[in-house]
Image: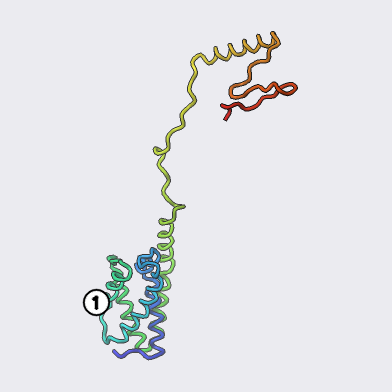
Amino acid sequence: MAAPGLEEGGLFARGVRAVLGGWAALQLAVAHGFGGPQSPEKATWLAGALQEFFAQNAELGEEEVEEFLAEVMDNEFDTAVEDGSLRQVSRELVTLFAQASRGDAGGVGEALGALARRGPALRAALATAHLEESPAHAPPTPEGDTPPRTPPPHQEGGEESSEEEEDEEEEAMECGTPPPPPDGWTLDAGGPGGRLGLGGGGR
């Protein structure tokens, strides 16, 4: 089959971009950076390389295109595509090339419309991939990993101790001696009337 002319080549270029843009394996490889920092540039390069590959090789079959794509994904993105999409993408590219070579703008348009309908599912897959990588969505720590709070120690005879403290305060009031300050506080009698301040154990 002869290489398409300028107009037909433009139709095929649109088809190639649409096919690659809807290819989940490639887009996920780009999103995850499997091709390194230049992953988006490599995806753009692949579109041009495919157009050149078709232009320079007459009568390409699906298997040849599939081998070409598999090699690029392996070499450039370190990805082995095993979901069966290589065969589907290759078939779509071969069909689009044939339509573009005939100048079948209607057929190319229908194919582009079908590819566009994949958009929502692909965007959802990419969004899920981003959420799984985000630290903000890391799995919660199991409850068993958090040590339980230690309840305050139970003081035996607590009620009796409280009664004894109250008796001491009453005796101090009767004798004119100020009651001892609460635990953790010290009495500063330097100023008029005195004042309570935090002692060393108050914090």
Secondary structure under tag 1 reads helix
Residue at (34%, 67%) from the top-left corner?
Answer: 25
Quadrant for residue 65, please give it.
Answer: bottom left
> Against 187, is 20 above or below?
below
Q: Quadrant of residue 89?
A: bottom left
The residue at the point 59 percent across, 24 percent down is: 184
Q: Residue visible at 27% across and 87% down? A: 58
Image coordinates for residue 41, horizontal then vertical, percent:
40, 73
**Of residues 140 and 4, the one drawn nearer to the viewer in this rendering:** 140
x and y, in percent, of residue 141 in the image:
41, 43
Which quadrant is the N terminus positioned in? bottom left
Amino acid carrying label 1: it is: Glu
Image location of residue 18, percent across then percent down? 40, 76
Is 120 rendered above or below residue 99?
above
Q: How many residues crowd around disc 1 within 10 Å: few (fewer than 14), some, or many (20 or more)?
A: few
Q: Which residue is mark 1?
A: 63
Residue at the spot x=44%, y=56% of the render?
134
